Amino acid sequence: MGLERLLRARAGDLVAPAALVVVLLGVYLAGPGAIHVLRYERAAVFAGEAWRLVTAHLVHADAAHLGWNLLGVGIVAVLFAHDYAPRQWLVIAAASVAAIDAGFLLLEPQLEWYLGFSGVLHGLMAAGLVAWLRGSRDPFAWFVTVLFVAKLAWEHWAGPLPFTAESLSLPVIHEAHTYGAVGGALAALWFVYRSPRPASL
């Protein structure tokens, strides 16, 4: 069950998530002036400012925006940190970033700007669920996966979840969540394909 995954979490597994939290906090503390230099801006990217394709995912509009994403990092860390090595998590994050950026550039020409870690966070969550479902007969894993997919579907058909949208001062770009989830899931499936299948839990 999910409780078993919580009990499996080890302090060593939380080093990389803790480092990520430090990075996100550090970028936020750089101040509002950093936002316009670091966020994704379509016109600026095509003008040669390619760093925005990476830094956009590290900068946040305000404390509430950052807080929701830090909460998400904590949930993913506690549930899934032990499922991949730090290097694999880095690849998963990079795949999520690449999928989001490709989606924006190729499929969202109307999107002028974007910032925040939520898209990458959905990629990390998707990768964690792939690991959880692999070799597991835990019905709770399928329940959480269905909720995750339902959230993405809700965002596409009905808009952002009310309790998150009301707490944010900027629009939720749900496409980033979908692109990130696809990128993270694909990277996780690649690792699953390359590694031996674990015993069923």
Image: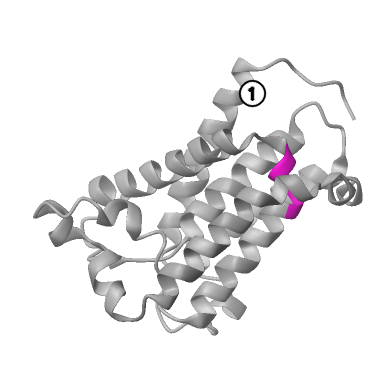
Residue found at x 47% / y 56%: 119
Q: Secondary structure at mark 1?
A: helix
Residue 81: x and y, percent?
Answer: 70, 45
User: Where is residue 199 drawn, in percent x and y?
Assistant: 86, 21
79 part of magenta stretch: yes
Amino acid type shown at disc 1: Val
Q: Quadrant of residue 147?
A: bottom right
Q: Is residue 26 visible?
A: yes
Residue 149 seen: no
Q: Is residue 78 above or below residue 65?
A: above
Q: Is residue 22 above or below residue 196?
A: below
Q: Nearer the viewer, residue 99 or 34?
A: 34
Start-end of magenta stretch: 78-82
Task: Please give left or right for residue 36 compared with residue 116 in the image.
Answer: left
The quarter of the picture where the C terminus appears is top right
Figure quadrant of residue 166 = bottom right
| Closer to us: 15 or 75 | 15
Residue 108, image x and y in percent? 27, 55
- Residue at 70 percent of width and 34 percent of height: 131
Residue lying at 52% horizontally and 38% vertically, measured from the top left: 92
Q: Which residue is mark 1?
A: 192
Circle 1 Cα neighbour tier, 10 Å, few/some/many (<14 / 14–19 / ≥20): some
Residue 35 included in the magenta stretch of the image: no
Task: Give the left or right position of residue 146, taking residue 171 as reference.
Answer: right
**Most prominent secondary structure in the magenta stretch?**
helix
Left or right: 21 as drawn, with respect to 6? left
